[in-house]
Image: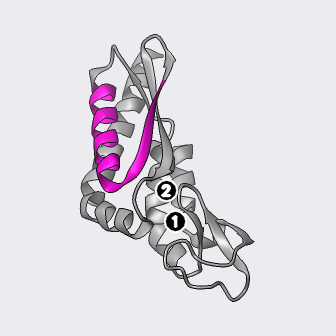
Amino acid sequence: MTASRQQGAAQTHPHLFAKVAAQRCVDCGIPLTTGEGFEVPFIGTLGPKCVKKYAALVAVLEQVDGLEAHEYDQGSIRLAHHVIWKLRGCGIAVKVLDIAADTKRVQIMGLSKKPLAVIKSYAEIRAQFERQLQIAQVEREAAEAAAS
């Protein structure tokens, strides 16, 4: 299992998100009686019930954040294009950075819709999206092995 996949698997457990001082959950708006919530990357501070809804989405976003596409590799370009298109459709803000003359990097900026709308949209495409990311990981590992 790759390091990024291990990190993503670890993030599906809510207790691994950092606890921070918070008054309300950004998803449901319920006051947090303990004064603490979970700081979830790309989403914000969530309560103990809502954090479970977002753990799988955050694991995928962390896997996608930093994804690179090279002009000479049509597979990586197709993957990056598809990922960006699907994420933006779900309500996730994505930026494409030029990091070299022939290389682009995907950067997750946050949410462009309300968190609940993003979760609902992502739930509709989740299986297909995760399958494509797994295929891309295998292709990337094969390309790296062939290059070395």
Q: Amino acid at mark 1?
A: Thr
Number of residues whose C-alpha sits closer than 10 Å to that of mark 1, classed few (under 14), some (14–19) or many (20 or more) = many
Q: Which of the 4 image quadrants contains residue 135?
A: top left
Could you tell me which secondary element the residue under label 2 belongs to?
helix
Residue 80 image offset from top left, x and y in percent: 34, 34
* Residue 97 placement, left or right of 133: right
Q: Can residue 13 be seen by looking at this rendering? A: yes
Residue 148 image offset from top left, x and y in percent: 48, 16
* Residue 44 placement, left or right of 84: right
Q: Which residue is mark 2?
A: 59
Segment tinted magenta in the rendering: 75-97
Q: Vertical placement of 94 versus 92: above or below? A: above
Q: Are marks 2 and 1 in contact (CB under 8 Å)?
A: yes
Front one among 101 and 127: 101
Q: Amino acid at mark 2?
A: Ala
Res. 12 mark? 1
